[in-house]
Amino acid sequence: MATDSTASNIANELAGDIHSGLLRPGDMFPSERSLCGRFGVGRSIVRDGMTILHGMGLADHAKGMRPRVAVPKLSRVMLGASDAAQYFFKDNEGRAHLQQARLFLETSMVQYAVQNASNAQIAKMVGAVEECDANLDNIAGFRNADVKFHRALAEVPGNPIFVALHETFVDRLMKRAPIEDNLLAHNQISNEGHKEIISAILAKDSGAAVRSLTEHLVRNYETFLHRSLINKILKT
């Protein structure tokens, strides 16, 4: 296989052609023979470069056909970032930092929801709350419904970046959180928080919505931070 630097250089050069408009979505890439001549390398190195480009979401490989320029999907790009970022969020301290960042993002979204959420969007949150109520003693079921509630909130602004951030980080964070000792009580309190958030949105009360969401998320942030401090004490 080609060295990473040589293959990466080819991928970066072709990516530059795409970003500059020289190559457009749907266009075929130049033939391997043409690329070999352009970069002064063999076919195997060109293929390695195309593999890297495919990993970047900029090349579409169809069997038996020359690769075409592809438009990268935001969700795919964010997924790659998520895989790399998991190293930083593997312990309680990292999860606490992520929860804090999430708090800043979601408090802005809930303020927007108070003023702009449609009846259909609020109904989606209500449906998630009902699903949570039906799965209070089912960890997988409750977490899936919990994710749906917060995704519904992220969808309100209509900004795909918010949804991608939710799917990339929040979804994984929530589904991989440690299981609490008193699962039923924990889930009941958590879902009451969801209901308070919806009530505040319906009342068009931005202050109450932010307070309810903050209490809801800070509880998780403090849980991870507390565990992190305990682990540090035990290691000393």
Image (cartoon, grey):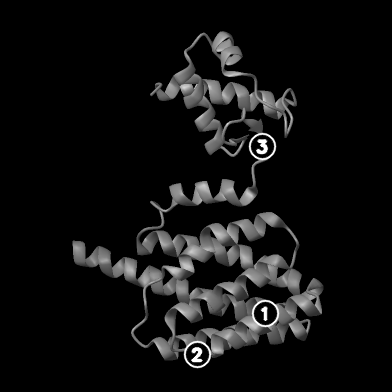
Of the numbered discs in the image, which one, if any, rests on residue 70?
Answer: 3
Residue 125 at least partly seen: yes
Disc 3: CA contacts within 10 A as few (<14), some (14-19) or many (>=20):
many
Residue drawn where x is 41% and y is 21% of the image: 2
- To which residue does mark 1 refer? 125
Nearer to me, 95 or 72: 72
- Disc 1 residue type (three-letter): Met
- Disc 3 residue type (three-letter): Ala
Q: On the rendered structure, is 230 left or right of 22?
A: left
- To which residue does mark 2 refer? 188
Residue drawn where x is 63% and y is 69% of the image: 151
Disc 2: CA contacts within 10 A as few (<14), some (14-19) or many (>=20):
some
Q: Position of residue 18 (x, y in %)?
A: 68, 28
- Contact? badges 1 and 2 (CB < 8 Å): no
Q: Alpha-carbon distance for marks 1 and 2?
A: 16 Å
Q: On the rendered structure, is 86 left or right of 195?
A: left
Q: Quadrant of the N terminus?
A: top left
Nearer to me, 45 or 15: 45
- Disc 2 residue type (three-letter): Gln
Q: Position of residue 186 (x, y in %)?
A: 44, 86
Nearer to me, 9 or 195: 9
Residue 197 at least partly seen: no
Nearer to me, 51 or 229: 51
Task: Specify the quadrant of the image occupied by residue 92.
Answer: bottom left
Residue drawn where x is 78% and y is 81% of the image: 204
